[in-house]
Amino acid sequence: MKSYLDRRVAPLTAGLALLIVLSSGGCNGTETSSVAGPIRFSSGVDRLHSWLCGRFNSSAQAEGDSTFRSISLHGVPIWPDREDGRWLYVEEAASDALDRPSRQLAHRVRNDAQGGLISEVFGFPEGEVPPAGSWKDPNYFNSIDPALLIPREGCTLYLLTVTGSQPAFTGGTKGDGCASALNGADHATSEVRIDATSINTWDRGFDAKGTQVWGAESGPIEFVRLDNAG
């Protein structure tokens, strides 16, 4: 099996994998395809959103493990005036190919109907995919109608809060409903851990028999924050 990043040629359907979900920050639901309408959310949503925003890369991991490449990850807040959650744009690319992103997604961080923390994942419609490097200009997204975003059904991330001396959020997708056709896959899964200084994401694809066909075998990509969290 090729290394994890060698297989990430096309955008993945999982959240950030995003990408990339979590109590107060400064980077400023049940799974649903609804994009509009006011939804109340907890302070945990703000902290998660803050920790997902920023500049990250995995160069330290790549230097110690040749099966991983150095990947750059950028998350920026978008549509701050919307009342249906905290939105961010996530762009991911190999550090030596920033002009060719492997992932460009919008995430909506909010509470589900039970008060839990979720991050819903949305793709951009054909012809509306942002230019590479759009994380540098969040105002660019004011030209995109959120109602036209494409929900990635089954790819929502469900997060739990870890308390103690090193607070964090952990969780991932549920079941096998996050569709993926990459390298003959039937579906994808994503596991994440997010704290104030790092984001770890483990995205994998499986065929209909449950055999892994893409993704790392040894563990998650380890993104280290390059700037200060809010």
Image: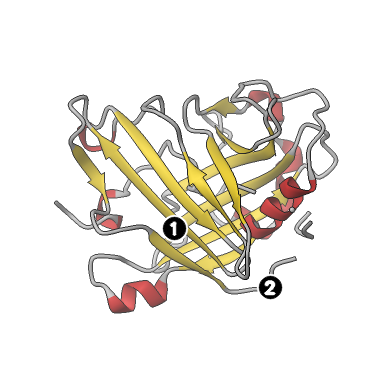
- Residue 24 lies, in percent from the top left, at 79, 56
Residue type highlighted by circle 1:
Ala
Is there any visible trace of residue 170 in the rendered image? yes
Query: What residue is at 22 percent from the left and 37 percent from the top?
Result: 183
Q: Which of 47/3 is in front?
A: 47
Q: Which of 112/100 is in front?
A: 112
- Residue 185 lies, in percent from the top left, at 25, 32
Label of residue 93 in the image? 1
Against 39, is 118 above or below?
Answer: below
Which residue position is annotated with label 2?
A: 228
Judging from the image, what secondary structure is the residue with disc 2 in?
loop
When asked about the image quadrant of residue 186, the answer is top left
Lower sequence index among marks 2 and 1: 1
- Residue 146 lies, in percent from the top left, at 70, 30
Determine the CA span between mark 2 and mark 1. 21 Å
- Residue 225 lies, in percent from the top left, at 57, 70
Q: Which of 187/149 is in front?
A: 187
Residue type highlighted by circle 2:
Asn
